[in-house]
Amino acid sequence: MKKLITIIALAAACPAWADHHKEDTMETPGTSGPDLVVELRKPMVNEVVVSNVGQTAASASVVAIGCAAITLVAEPPTERCVTGAEYSDYSMQGMNTVARLDVPALAAGEKAKFKIPYWRDMQLKEEIGYKFLIRADSENQVDESNEDNNQAEALLGDAPASR
């Protein structure tokens, strides 16, 4: 903070100094700090990867893995991906089955891989597609350089891509 105040004071007092040193004082947006992203294979498989693509370490956080059954007719889904109270303690808009998993602290460039807890309990039906929404740092525990790239979606089954 003290360095920033000194730079502002120098720039105000001497515009020529500011022009000469502007590259030294500008940060490139979205490059400093941790940045958690989700990596998925498409079509969806039983693996979720959370990566820290930022330049500094990310503290421990939570990843939310949501699933919604998508009927292949124009009506709201009546099916759940999985039934069970253990997946109903957390909500995500549009998802009716959600699991939360703890993500350990990740160094810059480090990844953590997870299996979806409810995957083997899913009873896949031909007439239903499944949409997954995975959100890294779902509880906003990490101050990231880019907060807009924390989630990814994937489909499983014959769900229309437009849903």
Image: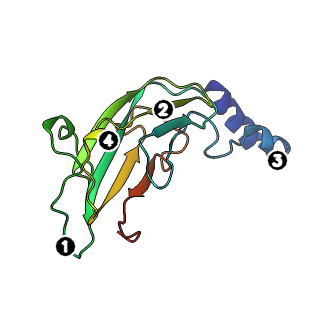
N-term-proximal mark, 3 vs 2: 3
Amino acid at the residue labelled 3? Asp
Q: Secondary structure at mark 4?
A: helix
* Whether label 3 touches label 1, CB < 8 Å: no
* Whether label 4 touches label 3, CB < 8 Å: no
Q: Residue at x 15, y 40 (%)?
A: 84
Residue 59 appears anywhere in the view = yes
Mark 3 highlights which residue?
19
* 17 w.r.t. 77: above or below: above
Label 4, label 1: how far apart the Cα atoms are = 25 Å
Quarter-wise, where is residue 56 in the image?
top right
Q: Secondary structure at mark 1?
A: loop
* 162 w.r.t. 42: above or below: below
Q: Farthest bottom residue?
A: 74
Residue 94 appears anywhere in the view = no
Mark 4 highlights which residue?
119
Disc 4: CA contacts within 10 A as few (<14), some (14-19) or many (>=20): few
Mark 1 highlights which residue?
75
Mark 2 highlights which residue?
113
Quarter-wise, where is residue 72 in the image?
bottom left
Q: Residue at x 82, y 47 (%)?
A: 19
Image quarter of the C terminus? bottom left
